Image (cartoon, rainbow, N blue to C red):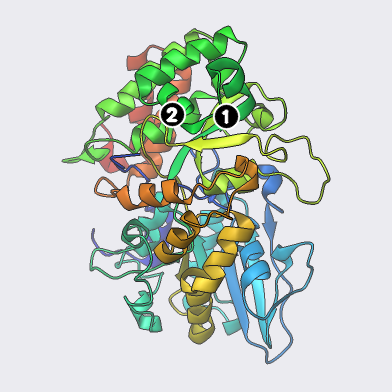
Amino acid sequence: MKKRTLSLILATAMVAGSLVGCGGGSASSSSAPAQEPAAEAEATEAEAPAAETPAAEAEAAPAADGAAVVNIYCWNNEFPNRMMDHYPGFTANDPADSTKGGKIGDTVINFVVTDNKDNMYQNKLDEALAAQATAADNDKVDIFLIEADYAMKYTDPSVNVAMPLDELGITDADLSKQFQYTKDVVTDADGKIRGSSWQACSGGLIFNREIAKQVLGSDDLETVQAAVADWDAFNATAQKMKDAGYKIVATVNDTFRVYSNNVSGKWVQDGKIVVDDNVKKWADDSKALVDAGMTTTNDMWSDDWSKGFQAPGDVFCYFGPAWLINFSMGADPSKEDDGSIAHAGGWGLVNGPQGFYWGGTWICAAQGTDNPDIVKDIILNMTTNDDIMKDIAVKDSDCVNNKDVLNALATDETFGNAILGGQNPYQMLSEGAEKIDLSNLSEYDQACVEEYQNAMKNFFDGNATYDEALAQFMTAVGEKHPELAQ
C-alpha cells in the first residue's frame, strides 16, 4: 500500500474481516461482549446489542489541573466493566455505570464511548486520531479498542496510529501464553504486534436444552452434536424443529460466520472479488431454510432476533463465542428472575457443523500518547496477568486469551458455567482457538462480509434472483473500494 496522509487513509481505508478457516470445530461477545465485541448488518462482533450500549456517545468530564488523563476510546460498556471489575486499584466514579470513568491512583481514566452503529465509532476515533499531533495532552487518545473485522485499518504501519507493543516495552515473553491467532490479527506487514486482547473468541453452537429434550430426545452433548455434526445433519434437524413448531436459528445471519470462516481463499484475489464456494453454500442453504419457513431474514441484534433468549423460547440454537453467551444472552444478575433461558441455565454448547471464530476486542496504544507507562500497565494487566485472566474467566464467563488459565479451568471439576447448565466449555473453546487460521484475512473483508449479507436478503425474501443480488453486492463493494469496481 502506498503511504498516504493520516487523514486520507483513515477516511478511506477499509477494514479486515474475520474470514478464517478453523479446520475443526470463536468468541467476542460481542465481544458482542463480553464481547464483540462488535456486526454484519449494523453491529459486529464483540459487540453488544443496542440495549447493552450505555449511550450513543459518552465522554467523561475533564480532570483537575495537573492530573494525568488517560482517554480510552471504545464502543460499549464491556471494557469499562472489565476495568472497573478487575483492574487493581481502579476506583469508579459511578459503580453503577462504568462508562463514567474513574481513577487509578491520581490518574484520571476517561472512557469515550461511541456506538458502533453506522460506523459511528470508527468515524469518531478517526477524527480524534487525525488530530492527535496537535491535541492538548489531556485531549489525546491514549488507548483505543478495535475488532478483528477492521484491525488492518489501524495496524497498517504506513498509517502508524497504533504503537508497536515493543515500543512500550511489551515483549514476546509477555504475550507467550496468548493464542497465536490473537497476535496475528494485530501483526502488521513488518511483523510488529500493535495490540493485545484478553479474549479468545472461538465459537460453537449454543442450543436450547428444553427444545433438544423435546425434539431430539435428550440434551446430552453427544446427542445434540450428532444432530448438527455437518450441514446436511443440521438441515435435517431444521425440518424436525419446524415440525415441532420451532425455528432452527433466529435468522439466516446466525450461521453466516460459520460458513465464511471456512473458505479456501480471500474475498479479493488478483484484484477481483471472489465468492468462495462455502459462502455460496450459505446463500443456497439459507434460501432453502427461509423458503421452508425454518428461519427468518431478521436482522441480528433486533428484538425479533433476541426473542429466543427468553423462556420458553422458539429458537433451537444460536452460533457464537463466549461473549455472546454471557454478554448478550446472559441473565440479568440484578434481577431475581429475568425470565431468560440463561437465568435458568437452559443453554448448552457443542461444536456444531464447522469450527469458527467471531469477534474479540483488542487494546491498542495510540501513537502520540502522553501516558505510555500507564498505557503499558493497562495492556499488561488486562491481557496478560494470570490472576486477572482467571478472575475474568470465572466471574464473567469470558473465554480469556491465556492458554495456561484455560487449561487449568478446563480440568477443574468444580468449575461450570451457570448459563450453560453447569457445563464447562473451556476445553472446547480452547481447542477451537488453537485451530483458528487467519491466512484468508484481508483489508476488504468488512465491506464484503456486510454487503454480501445485505444483498442476499433480497434473494432470500424473493425480491431478487441470486445473480441480481450478487450484482448488487459487487456494486456496493465497488462503491466502498473503487479499485474493485467490476
Q: Three-letter amino acid code at disc 2?
A: Gln
- Residue drawn where x is 48% and y is 26% of the image: 224
Q: Which corner quadrant holds the C terminus? A: top left
x, y (%) of residue 226? 41, 25
Q: Nearer the viewer, residue 59 or 192?
A: 192
Q: Quadrant of the N terminus?
A: bottom left
Relative placement, left or right, of 459 versus 330 is left
Given residues 362 and 321, the one toward you in this image is 321
Q: Whole-percent x and y of residue 337? A: 81, 40
Name above or below for residue 291 compared with residue 350: above
Q: Position of residue 19 (x, y in %)?
A: 34, 42
The crowding category of the residue bearing disc 2, from other C-alpha atoms within 10 Å (few below 14, some 14 to 19, many at least 20), is some
Which residue occupies 60% across, 29% down?
A: 208
Task: In the rendered view, tell whether residue 120 sits above or below residue 356.
Answer: below
Furthest residue to the front?
413
> Does the rendering let one see residue 486?
yes
Q: Please identify the residue farthest to the bottom as the structure is shown.
A: 66
| Kind of residue at disc 1 | Asp
- Coordinates of residue 296 in the picture (x, y in percent): 55, 19
Tell me the SS state at disc 1. Answer: loop
Q: Nearer the viewer, mark 2 or mark 1?
A: 2
The residue indicated by pointer 2 is 225
Residue 93, by quadrant, is bottom right
Q: Quadrant of residue 213?
A: top right
Residue drawn at point x = 54 percent, y = 83 percent: 374
Categorize mark 1 by other alpha carbons within 10 Å: few (<14), some (14-19), many (20+).
Answer: many
Tag of residue 299 = 1
Q: Earlier in the sequence, mark 2 or mark 1?
A: 2
Name the element at disc 2: helix
Residue 38 visible in the snapshot: no
